[in-house]
Image: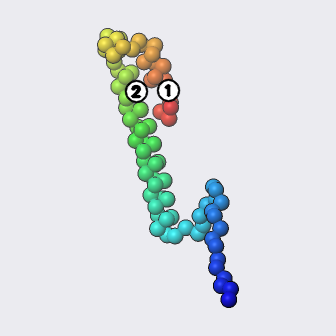
């Protein structure tokens, strides 16, 4: 007597796994918000550090091993870089 067995096909590489359960959707959303928050914190930190760097005197920059030109190059960068 023959029995019928089903074999699951292997998943296609790069294909999304739909439909996602509500828990999976919440997890993806949570991870997305966490990643966005990390970027915002990093960008804010860069803005604060560059503003502080702009206030330093030439002597203070020299103590840090920087020239005014090097500091200006860093200060003039946009916050996302």
Label count reads: 2
- Pick whichever, 53 or 65, lies toward us: 65
Q: Quadrant of residue 70?
A: top left
Which numbered tag is attached to residue 50?
Answer: 2
Return the residue found at the far front.
Answer: 1
Distance between the Cα atoms at labels 2 and 1?
Answer: 9 Å
- Pick whichever, 8 or 13, lies toward us: 8
Which numbered tag is attached to residue 56?
Answer: none
Q: Earlier in the sequence, mark 2 or mark 1?
A: 2
Contact flag, marks 2 and 1 (Cβ < 8 Å): yes
2, above or below 29, in the image: below
What residue is drawn where x is 68% and y is 86%?
2
Return the residue found at the far right.
Answer: 2
What residue is drawn where x is 63% and y is 64%?
10
Q: Identify the element where label 2 is drawn.
A: helix
| Neighbour tally class for label 2: few under 14, some 14-19, many 20 plus, Cα within 10 Å | some
Q: Position of residue 20 (x, y in %)?
A: 55, 67
What residue is drawn where x is 49% and y is 23%?
76
Q: In the rendered image, is residue 57 in sight? A: no
Q: In the rendered image, is residue 51 in sight? A: yes
Q: Position of residue 9 (x, y in %)?
A: 65, 67
| Neighbour tally class for label 1: few under 14, some 14-19, many 20 plus, Cα within 10 Å | few
Is residue 35 rendered to the left or right of residue 49? right
Is residue 66 rendered to the left or right of residue 5? left
Quarter placement of the N terminus: bottom right
Q: Identify the element where label 1 is drawn.
A: loop
What residue is drawn where x is 41% and y is 32%?
46
Q: Position of residue 17 (x, y in %)?
A: 59, 64
- Pick whichever, 64 or 3, lies toward us: 3
What residue is shown with label 1? 77
Q: Position of residue 4 (x, y in %)?
A: 66, 82
């Amino acid at each position: 007597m023959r029995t019928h067995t089903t074999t699951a096909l292997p998943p296609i590489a790069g294909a999304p796994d739909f439909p996602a359960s509500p828990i999976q959707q919440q997890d993806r959303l949570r991870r997305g918000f966490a990643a966005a928050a990390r970027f915002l914190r990093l960008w804010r930190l860069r803005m604060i550090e560059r503003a502080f760097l702009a206030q330093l005197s030439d002597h203070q920059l020299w103590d840090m091993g920087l020239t005014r030109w090097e500091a200006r190059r860093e200060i003039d960068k946009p916050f996302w870089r």
